[in-house]
Amino acid sequence: MSEQKSAADLAAETTAAFERRHSEVQDIAEKALALAQEGKQLTEAEKVKADEAITGLNEVKGLLNQLEQKLARESAAPSAPSTAGARFVEADEFKTFAEQSRPRGRVIVDVKDISSLTTDAAGSVGHLIENQQVAPQMLPKRRMTVRALLAPGQTNSNMIEYDREKVFTNAAAPVAEGTIKPQSELQFEEATATVRTIAHWMRASVQVLADAPALRSIIDQRLRYGLALAEEAQLLNGSGTGQNLLGLVTAATAYSAAFTPVSATAIDQLRLAALQVSLAEYSASGFVLNPIDWARIELTKDAEGRYLIGNPQGTISPSLWGLPVVATQAMTVDKFLTGAFNLGAQIFDRQDATVEVSTEDQDNFVKNKVTIRAEERLALAIYRPQAFVYGDLGFVA
């Protein structure tokens, strides 16, 4: 298959053709001028050739003007962000696969990125192939995620070995000259974080391979989003057994207030939880709440009916006590988690989100279907459990 040329390449070729035509017309004009000075004229054949050269020049000039205008429009148009689905359908390996008259085999594309719904019957996504063309749907505004709070990392191994901080005793104190200095104690215990796989797949009509917008929508709005939801649930609530990550909630320290303020509210509790993190020699970097509880807090009013948290007409990102708030349904209602997310734990990505398309299945062959799978591999290392505090908000009795 011949390579498709870009508008810029076509413009360059058209410019070259214009220059050649222009050179031909210029040569004929110079010859005609020289003959006129001798009292002679062009022959009929030369006149025909001159007319053809001038006509060709005008045609090429018109094409060149159209291409220049198109390039100007394209450069002025805002470029849309490239989603995971867009990167997949634009990948050369997928294009080669999809351009086959009867695609057979599989193709894998690393779409990276991450970070986030299904149909009732397998293969029902095939109804997305329609003759009518519609404007692409805008992706929902990306919310703050637990992953965004945590320190990022990469690994090429299947297991992360690290030292988990167990006890820190600070004995630092002023000492007199020549006396024995006090000894502080920092105890560690060996810990491991196993790389786990999060994956799912769905079946679609094989015609989806020829419909880039539909395939892009499946990848972005279903497969990638599903991975993000499962990942967030694991990062928070993973049990650490079987194929589950050890989640932050599972490893966190129970909430224990340093003091009890008068007429304490949920907002007070979150501040005291951040204080508990500080007393463990770390600084809290965020809060994780269920959306229902965050809505309760946002709707809190004073005696005069004024909102305590922000302005209903404002567009400020969710925050409390100067720290970002992640509102996710992965957190149980009436529970909260706070901690030094940026220092107390770290994500290690072994395999960024990867999308694989395959027709290598007897059921696919018989039913003219294709299997689309998305998966990622990661580990979560929790360096100091005391840096995370988990507790009740007191909304539910």
Image (cartoon, helix red, strand yellow):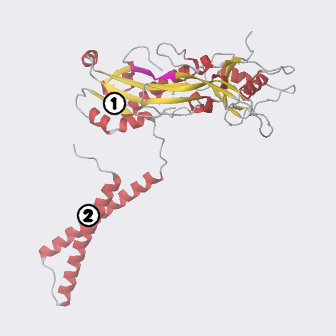
Q: Mark 1 and mark 2 in contact? Answer it, CB < 8 Å.
A: no
What is the quadrant of residue 395 in the picture? top right
Q: In the rendered view, does 244 fall on the left or right side of 25?
A: right
Mark yes or no: residue 134 visible.
no
| Residue type, label 2 | Ala
In the image, 4 versus 194, the foreground residue is 194
What is the quadrant of residue 386 in the picture? top right
User: Dot 1 corresponds to which residue?
Assistant: 108
User: Dot 2 corresponds to which residue?
Assistant: 17
In the image, 371 versus 321, the foreground residue is 321
Name of the residue lying farthest toward the front:
178
Q: Tell whether position 341 is magenta.
A: no
| Residue type, label 1 | Ile
The mark tally for this picture is 2
Residue at 81 percent of width and 26 percent of height:
301
Q: Secondary structure at mark 2?
A: helix
C-alpha distance separating marks 1 and 2: 42 Å
* Residue 241 pos. (x, y %): 51, 13
Q: Tell whether position 196 is magenta.
A: yes
Name of the residue lying farthest toward the bottom:
38
Q: Nearer the viewer, mark 1 or mark 2?
A: 1
In the image, 393 versus 226, the foreground residue is 393
> In terms of sequence position, does the residue under pointer 1 or pointer 2 come before the other?
2
* Residue 160 pos. (x, y %): 48, 26
As displayed, is residue 154 above or below residue 241?
below
Residue at 77 percent of width and 24 percent of height:
272
Kindly report the secondary structure that dominates the magenta region of the rendered protein.
strand
The part of the chain drawn in magenta is: 192-201
Residue count near mark 2 (Cα–Cα under 10 Å), binned few <14, some 14–19, many ≥20? some
